[in-house]
Amino acid sequence: MNIPIAKSRCETRDLPYHPEAIIQRLLELLCRYNESYREASLRAGLDHQAIRRILDGQRPNMTARR
């Protein structure tokens, strides 16, 4: 399924976002690996505040890197 990111983003932008599952999984992984939000974000190649924003309930951004 190769839908362009821009099209996928437009189609899902207005759908309800339920962050509970991803928040629970992130907290579990942070505990398991004993990492701070910053360490986990940087290790995942994300902006250093990305994990904090996701845990605050914000919808993750879809971006493409080449």
Image: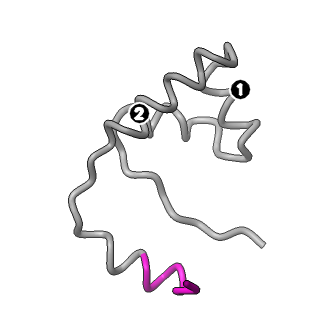
Numbered tag placed on residue 39 in the rendering: 1
Crowding at dot 2, Cα within 10 Å, few <14 / some 14-19 / many 20+, comes out as: some
Label 1 and label 2: CA atoms lie apart by 17 Å
Considering every residue shown, the one lying at the far front of the view is 1
Relative side of 51 to 12, left or right: right
Numbered tag placed on residue 59 in the rendering: none
Q: Which of 12 and 1 is in front in this view?
A: 1
Residue occupying image coordinates x 78% and y 73%: 66
Question: Which amino acid is tagged 1?
Answer: Glu
First along the sequence among labels 1 and 2: 2
**Above or below — where is 12 with respect to 20?**
below
Residue 46 position in % (x across, y down): 66, 46
Q: Which of 2 and 14 is in front in this view?
A: 2
User: Which stretch is magenta?
Assistant: 1-8
Dot 1: element = helix
Dot 2: element = helix
Kindly report which numbered mark, 1 or 2, lies closer to the viewer in this rendering: 2
**Above or below — where is 55 with respect to 46?**
above
> What colour-coding does the image apply?
one colour
